[in-house]
Image (cartoon, helix red, strand yellow):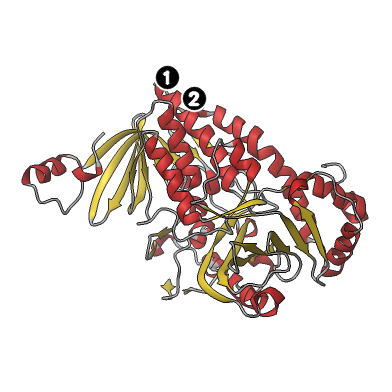
Amino acid sequence: MIVKEWCMYCGECAGVCPRNLIEVRELSLRFKEEGCKDCQICIQICPVNALKK
Amino acid sequence: MQRLSDLHPDMSCERLKKIRECFLMLVVDILVIGAGPAGSSAAKHAALNGAEVLIIDKKSEIGAPKRCAEGVSKEGLSELGIEPNPRWITKELSGVRMVSPNGTDVILDEDKVKLPEAGYILERKVFDKFMAMDAARAGAQIMVKTLATGLERDGDRVIVSAEHMDHDFEIQAKIIIAADGPESRVGRWAGLKTGTKPKNMESCAQFEMVNVEMAEPDCIEFYFGSVAPGGYAWIFPKGDDIANVGLGILNTLTEKTAYQHLLEFVDKNPATQNAQPVELNIGGDPVGGVIKDLVTDNVLVVGDAAGMVNPLTGGGITSGMIGGRIAGEIAARAIKNESWSAKDLKDYKKRCQDDVGQSFKKYLKAKEYLLNLSDEELDSIAEAFQKTDFDVINTSELIKKLIKVSPKALLKLGKIF
């Protein structure tokens, strides 16, 4: 997952990730890519379009 | 309990460094993860009831950045026994202005309004800190810039792995209170279904703006209809010409992001034609109602993480803090009784459902109905409301009035309200 520089680390993506794979830090996001099923819900929900596959 | 200084990597004293090496694990009765209002409320009440409590928060500053329109009711604060403090109140409101898509407005006076966000506009960056300070004064310890990264069980205890600056360590606790907000990861680590479905996650964007020219500068304003699909837009005054201007949408109902909708709202709204932003806030608001399973062995979930958000309004400060108070009391009681299984904690679920969850179920139904209204239907309801005399108004009474003026509402909501 590519996290654009305008990500504001609000955590909305983490809340909807059905596999709980997104760790939201104060100034970064970490994805556990190996468990990802490519549902792309995190991309769709982002309020500022900051996530890209 | 060991103190944060025992862990700090910059300590120069050799003796303290040696102590630090021995303290790779902190041991507490109750660990609260997240220092928002719900977490601080839980920590405060657990500490007041005699438990040894530690709060951790991943942010370097509690309360910042805000993810909220900052409205709170006087009734809600009063119920929590919190005295209004001018250091965290930016504006006292005199009413609510609701605006339909064609601009028809309904104004409700303060003495008649008991909506969850009508009363005060807070400065959350200060309010959240004050609530954490209250918890600290009650005896809780606080660690900021401390991130929980995982959870595992160890007999009848829980071990939470954590990071503070460049230091990894563990916290052993008898009870975890998960107050980690809409991300809600901690509950899921413990096996609870705290994740939010996209149809229940309101996606929000907000500017704090200056030069805002409100029609009713002492009222909070709500805008309904296609301006914010699945939610509403708001202008919440913060004093002078300053206001929070924002909206919440459901991504399942629109192709645009919350931010794109916000830009359009600001571009078109008469109040914001000369306004300039000084802050941008974004975030999710879980509006699907209180989650079914709030407890498991060793773990209670509170606040936004537990869906303690009014599904109709999106407000969750006081409901989360009420949930926090209940969680703190029940967790402290379990510590006193030396037993913290799901069975020992199950009263939490019942009390939350009684105090918070039941009313939210009704509002969820009302929300589902409102989502199906067209802009034209909203306009006709607003016009009917303009001709209606309101006595005392709260969310429930407002829906009852809606049923009276809308046959469609009667069919959908008549049996509920």
Q: Quadrant of residue B46?
A: top left
Question: Does residue B125 sit above or below B77 in this rendering?
Answer: below
Question: Does residue B400 sit above or below A5 in this rendering?
Answer: above
Q: Which amino acid does label 2 sit on?
A: Asp
Sequence order check, earlier mark of 1 and 2: 1
The residue pinned by badge 1 equals B337
Can you give x and y, in whole percent of width and height, for residue B60 in the image? 35, 57
Question: Does residue B341 sit above or below B237 in this rendering?
Answer: above
Q: How busy is the neighbourhood of tag 1: few (under 14 within 10 Å), some, or many (20 plus)? A: few
Q: Which amino acid does label 1 sit on?
A: Asn
Q: Which is in the foreground here, disc 1 or disc 2?
A: 1
Q: How busy is the neighbourhood of tag 2: few (under 14 within 10 Å), some, or many (20 plus)? A: many
Quick one: B292 or B138, which is closer to the camera?
Answer: B138
The residue pinned by badge 2 equals B344
Quick one: B111 or A12, which is closer to the camera?
Answer: B111
Spatial CA span between label 1 and label 2: 9 Å
Residue at 59% x, 44% y: name it.
B318
Residue at 37% x, 65% y: name it.
A27
Q: Could you tell whether B151 is left or right of B359 in the image?
A: left
Q: Could you tell whether B318 is left or right of B411 in the image?
A: left
Residue at 70% x, 62% y: name it.
B221
Q: Quadrant of residue A7?
A: bottom left
